[in-house]
Amino acid sequence: MADSSEVAERLALALNQNGMQRMVARVLAAFLFSDRESVTAAELGEQLGASAGSISAAITMLRTVGLIEPAPVPGSRRAHFRMRDDAWATLMSGQNAMVQVMQEIAEAGVASTPPGSPAARRLEGMRDFYAYLFAELPALIERWREQRHT
C-alpha cells in the first residue's frame, strides 16, 4: 500500500499540472488526506513546510470556491478549517456562475463577429456548449446527491 503522504503529493502535482496554483493544490491535498476533522493554518504550514502567507492565500482560495469552511472548535483560540461535507457538489454549483459568464461572453463574441465566419462558428460552439452545461449541471448535481443518500 502506498504512503498517503506520497499519494497526496501526487494529487497536488496533478492538480498543479492542470492549472491549480501549487500551494492551493498542496493544501487541498492535505485537507483530503487529513485524519483529523479540522486543521489550523499553522498545522498546515508545519506539515507542508510553507509560509503563513502562502497557507493563508490557499485557504482563502479554497474557501472562495466552497471546498473548505471554518470549523467550530470550542476552547481553541485558532481558526480551524475543514472540508465541506458536500465540497464537490458545492464547487460545481458555484461554478454555474462561471459557466453562465462563459456562455454570455461567447454570445457577445458571436454578435461581434461576421456571421458564418470561422470565429463566429467557434464562438457559437462555445456558447452552445456552455448553455448545455448551464442547463444540465443542476439536475446532474441533484441526481448525484440523491444517489449518494440512498
Image (cartoon, grey):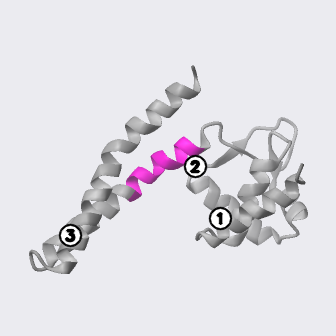
Question: In the rendered structure, which amino acid carries the disc numbered 2?
Answer: Gly
Residue 36 place in picture, x, y as percent = 85, 41
Q: Left or right? Give the position of 144 relative to 43.
A: left
Report the quarter where the C terminus lies. top right
Secondary element at image label 1: helix
Q: Mark 1 sits on what residue?
A: 15
State the residue at coordinates (53%, 26%).
147
Distance in Å between CA atoms under marks 1 and 2: 17 Å
Does 89 sit above or below residue 2?
Answer: above
In the foreground, 4 or 51 = 4
Amino acid type of the residue that numbered disc 3 sits on in the rendered structure: Ala
Three-letter code for the amino acid on which mark 1 is drawn = Leu
Q: Residue at x 65, y 41 (%)?
A: 84
Please say if 27 is above or below 94. below
Q: Secondary structure at mark 3?
A: helix
Which span of residues is magenta-colored?
A: 88-98
Labels 1 and 2: the sequence-earlier one = 1
The Cα–Cα distance between marks 3 and 2, rounded to whole angstroms, is: 29 Å
Most distant residue in the top direction: 150
Which of 69 and 126 lies nearest the eye of the viewer? 126
Residue 92 is a magenta residue: yes
Reading the image, the residue beneath label 3 is 108
Judge depth for marks 1 and 3 and give the one in front: 1
Judge depth for marks 3 and 2 and give the one in front.
Answer: 3
Image mark for residue 66? 2
Task: Tell me the distance, in whole angstroms, between the alpha carbons under discs 1 and 3.
Answer: 31 Å
**Looking at the image, can residue 104 be seen?**
no
Q: Is residue 84 left or right of residue 76?
A: left
> Residue furthest toward the front?
1
Give the mark, 3 or 2, whose residue is nearer the N terminus.
2
Residue 125 in sight in this render: yes
